[in-house]
Image (spheres, grey):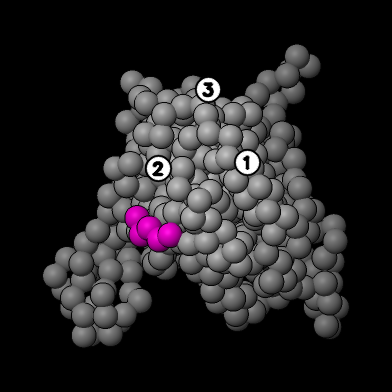
Amino acid sequence: MRQSQLFTKTRREAPADETAKNAQLLIRAGFVHKEMAGVYSFLPLGLRVLKKIEDIVREEMDAVGGQEIRMATLHPSEPWKQTGAWENVDVLFKIQSRTEKEYALGQSEEEIVTPIAQEYAPSYKDLPVAIYQIGQKYRDELRAKSGIMRGREFGMKDMYSFHTSQEDFEKFYERAKEAYLRVYSRCGLVAKVTEASGGSFSEKLSYEFMVITDAGEDDILYCEACTHCANVEVAKEKEGDSCPKCGKGTLKKAKASEVGNVFDLGQKYARDFGFSYKDAEGKDQLPIMGCYGIGITRLMGVIAETLSDEKGLSWPEAIAPYDVHLLVLTTDDAASVAFADSLYEDLSKKGKKVLYDDRSVRAGEKFADADLIGIPARVIVGKDSVAKGEVELVHRATGQMEKVTKETLLAW
């Protein structure tokens, strides 16, 4: 993509009403457009990042046996009333049509997925099964905040599994937990598995996946010596206490942001919908249900918060909108432009996705925009590049710079 043809432009200042770092940077860099509090449109650069995150999540969910579907987001009110959530879930968007029928905008999918599973899994032979979707969700937040990290409309991956026993659910949960940790690692983050209350979804203990960040909305206690981590709200210990898991480390307190969760829903929804399956002896049994969520847009916001610096965004390679940001500094020099053009074509032929800054603007503006947009590798073509056959390769995350030949770059 030639940057002169890119639909969006960068801006020096963020909107005055944005206080969240992720929203400020994403708007300035041209990744998102704010429609209103808690609602954002994703522009070409932002959508490329979002799709890459979705692909990583999709690969990991498929790897544990999840099957992708696409569920409706406009729901009839009846299943929500059947579970009691119509009155009990305060963030549920409720809509009345011209025919005076009532509907809900999906903020989760238990009320939709359970009847679907009921139709297709009538026997123990059909279980276990795990189905998931990646799509939009809606929540009537009284105070949307934190940019794309807490919105009224947001992207979500939610998976639901159905099992014949608690033991089978717990085995699947362990596999799902490892898949979640791989998702975060591939996205450049380190997440901690955190004990938390089940909230409105479940009376049982749930697990949240937390990333330590100053922008976090939760307080956690974690042990540096082992993997123990708990939300302060449900923890029996306090900061400075010995770790209850390993007994060696001391608990530290930190701000953290939730990037995923797992709920043991037990048999609640099976009871609500009369969902039973036939066991090996032909008797009716209620399945055990699990719910596994990853906020896709929220995850993108946490990455923008955590991996950025004072100059702008800094995307990990796996989810960057482009692999290489190619800058030609002297657009008035025909030889330099020809050299950069050929490099752009050669990199593209190699399968690299390149954002080519071919604009006729000052070099300083190009550098500032490159820092702001945050593509991991920057290739700079200057006046000496033609004579020496060299370019500068700059790594955005570290600032490391090296001079390499065109041939070395193409091999890399």
Q: How far apart in space, not on screen, are marks 2 and 3 (Cα)?
A: 26 Å
Left or right for 393, reference 254 = right
Residue of label 2: 371
Mark closer to the chain start, 1 or 3: 3
- Callout 2: 10 Å neighbours few (<14), some, many (20+)? many
Residue at image coords 26%, 80%: 225
The residue wearing badge 1 is 338
- Front tag of 1 and 3: 1
The type of residue carrying mark 1 is Ala
| Residue type (three-letter) at the residue carrying disc 3 | Glu
- Hey, which residue is sitting farthest front in the picture? 387
147 is higher (above) or lower (below) than 380 = above
Residue 163 lies in quadrant = bottom right
Kindly tell me whether residue 282 is visible in this rendering.
yes
Q: Tell me, yes or no, whether the two marked residues, 1 and 3, touch with CB atoms within 8 Å.
A: no
Dominant SS of magenta comes to strand
Residue 189's spot in the image, x, y percent? 43, 61
Is there CB contact under 8 Å for labels 2 and 1? no
Question: Dot 3: what SS?
Answer: strand
Question: In the image, residue 51 lies at what x, y percent?
Answer: 64, 48
The residues bearing labels 2 and 1 have C-alpha atoms spaced at a distance of 25 Å
* Residue found at the very far top of the displayed protein: 98
Residue 321 in percent (x, y) is at 57, 47
Q: Residue at x 26, y 75 (%)?
A: 224
Q: Which residue is mark 3?
A: 35
- Along the line of sight, which residue is nearer the eye, 356 or 292? 356
Q: State the extent of the magenta-drawn residues as a range.
A: 399-403
> Where on the picture, by quarter, is residue 137?
top right
Q: Which mark is residue 222?
A: none
